[in-house]
Amino acid sequence: MKCPGCQENFDDDFRSPRVLPCLHTCCTKCLKSSKKEIQCRECKEVFDARNVDVFSFPIDNAQKRIIDPDVRKINDSSVEHKRQIESHLQNLNQMRTSVDKVIGRLSDETRNLHLSENDASMQLEASFSSCINALKSRKEELKNKLLQLSQSKKKDLNLQLDYMKAQKSKLDQACKFSEYHLKNSNAAEFLLIKNHIVSRISHLKEHVPDVMPRMTADIKFEPINMEKEFLENCQRMGIVHTSFAYIPNTKVKTFDIVVGKEEIPFIITLHDFQNRQIKEEGIDIKVEIVNPKGQKMTAKVQDLVTAQGCYKAVYTAPKAGEYRGIININGSPLPRADMLFKAKTENEKHTESDKGDSRRRNEKTKSSRYTALDGDVHSPTFTMDMHHLHLQNELSEDKKTQTNQKKRRKTPRIPCRAFQNFRGTIGSRPMNISGQTYFEVQVRFFIKRSMRQDLVFEIGLCRKSDVDKYYCIDGHPCAYAICARKCHVCRTVCLQAWNYGRRLYHTPLTENSPPGTTYRATYGFLLDIEHGVWVVADARNKRLIMKFSYVDTSKPLWPVFGVYNPDLCNTYLTLRSGEDITSVLEFPVDI
């Protein structure tokens, strides 16, 4: 703002705005220039200035805070773009952390490869020492093969290590450059450079590196058939091998079995990182079966690679019910670690199939547990859990709608099992079906009183043991949540996405949100366990909202639903799953 006398901008020094008795404003310099009397330039009122100290007129701080409209537009735009960059920067930091872990693993594997090579070479020498003359040529052949495999693996590991270091360098530069301009650039400078930053970040996000090592340092030598009687068969003595199996590409077929019979619930085939099937014998595959009571038992694994190109798990179920398999290959669990199958009686089995070994899950038909949709996308049938519901909230009779408004007639429940801290409940089952899982939640809320920074609702995924630790779940490392809360920046109710106490997404839902505001929406949630991705979308407007990357699915994640502040707003969350879902939004996982 400018002084009406000299038409110069107010500042904090010689031109600070002073309030005259007529309540108009004039700068300090103009007042000092008036010797006998002071005349207001706006209302023309005259004041005696002979015995008046200029500094006795109070400073108009409000005038100092008034910003030129054009400057305000630039600042507002800068804040919005900085908010977008901060959101992108969060994703880059997650990518950088993941790449750091991969670089560490690749470096360890490269070092271990040399140690494994030395160990295998020492075993080979010890085994051949007793028959060195007859096996000399065979020994050299095996050592050459060992060296060839080692060099091949070392080359592949070094190539991927160099690639990961290059990706790390790109991410470091992007983060460093972005953080520097976020901290040091003024609004105008930032707007000039922000398109370059966004373009570079978008390019990096579109080219997400493969974060799984393609090779492992597991070269071994096995002293097979090395006895005196086979000296004449020295050309077939010993074997040097390594595994090229890429664990995430492992294919597992699941079958229901008959109670009391030794049958095959799993058939396992190995594939390399290019998804080509490979036939490798002697792979360390372990299968644990968890019965309906939660007890673990070990299943036998048959190596049928030579005859059938696969491994088969054999198990005898003692009782009927649903069982869960946990598969480990070379000490590493499958990304989709939990496999479900059913043990049925002879009569039940014959009712469903004439041959008795049809698959438990046919991905193109509906079953009592989930609804098969497009491709590998399933919608499990589940409800909200009544027993864990916080005593502040209520559930409908079908257990699909939760509200923060108490009923006159209390719903029967067990208080000792109800959540004490978290203001809501969990789903009746975890999201642990292999492939992609989808469900929807309809949201309605009505604001009754003025809100500050108050929560309205929260929907997310979380480990069951972490849900009731706090008032909400957005601070847990293995919790992924969207929530609506009154925002002090936007001064309205905003939709936000959180993980581990970090806000990853932020957008207004309403305007100002005064009492009387009503909001309705339907959100769709797609979890891909294999890729570790959770996508949130606006199902009604068919619009992507947020993609959570690097979701930790090593342990089951439970759907979580919370509603808050019953004195300030009426909130309703309605779950849609199973046969309630007829179609899934078409959004790819690699967006």
Image (cartoon, rainbow, N blue to C red):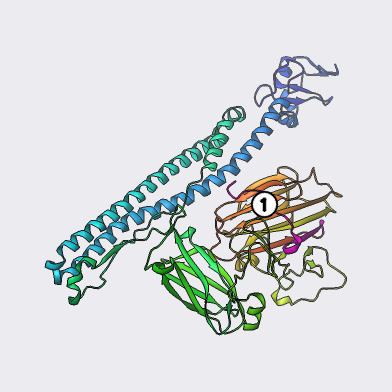
The part of the image, by quadrant, that contains residue 202 is top right
Q: Where does the magenta region start and end?
A: 567-591
Which of 480/579 is in front?
579
- 82 w.r.t. 277: above or below: above
Q: Is residue 211 visible?
A: yes
> Is 489 inside the magenta-drawn segment?
no
Residue 80 appears left or right of 399: left
- Which residue extends farthest left? 133
Find residue 401 and report its horizontal and vertical position in percent.
79, 64
The residue at the point 65 percent across, 47 percent down is: 505
Which of 338/103 is in front?
338
The residue at the point 73 percent across, 42 percent down is: 490
Residue at the spot of label 1 = 536
Name the quarter where the N terminus is drawn: top right
Asked which secondary structure carries label 1, the reply is strand
Residue 132 appears left or right of 432: left
